[in-house]
Amino acid sequence: MSLFVDLYICRSSVQERHQMPFSMFLAAVSGWTNLIVAFCFPFSFMKRFFGLRLGFTLTILLCLAATVLFFTTTSSTPLIGYFVWLSGIALIIFPFAEVL
């Protein structure tokens, strides 16, 4: 990634240089979602860890908000895998949700 950043800094457009770091930050924060879900998964089966799971869930939702913000501020378009990824995350962080 540093090679990409080094090549990007050499560009001459000042406007693009100021937009790219924020979108890269959003991409990094959305990438943390997978790691946090992996930490949350073992605690999803026991109700006694509700407080810990709640903290993980709020952090995951914050990271997912960064993902949505990334897609709205850049020209990237989410594909079908993004929605499958979201549904998998929802199944992990809300294991005891009642199905209507």
Image (spheres, rainbow, N blue to C red):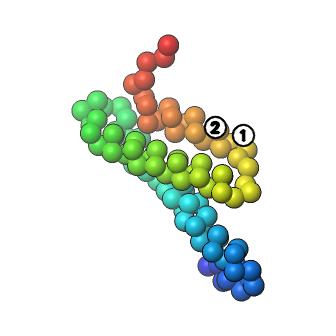
Distance from Cα at disc 2 to Cα at disc 1: 6 Å
Outermost residue, top direction?
Answer: 100
Say which of 30 and 45 sits in front.
30
Outermost residue, front direction?
Answer: 15
Q: Residues within 10 Å of mark 1 (few under 14, many from 20)?
A: few
Q: Residue at x 65, y 38 (%)?
A: 83
* Residue 57 % position (x, y): 40, 42
Q: Is residue 77 above or below residue 25?
A: above
Residue 70 lies left or right of residue 59; in this view the side is: right
- The residue beneath circle 2 is 84
Residue 18, located in which quarter of the rendered image? bottom right
Q: Residue at x 52, y 48 (%)?
A: 65
* Residue 14 % position (x, y): 69, 80
Quarter of the image for the N terminus: give it. bottom right
Say which of 39 and 66 sits in front.
66
Q: Residues within 10 Å of mark 2 (few under 14, many from 20)?
A: few
Q: Residue at x 65, y 44 (%)?
A: 82
- The residue beneath circle 1 is 80
Residue 49, located in which quarter of the rendered image? top left
Q: Secondary structure at mark 2?
A: helix
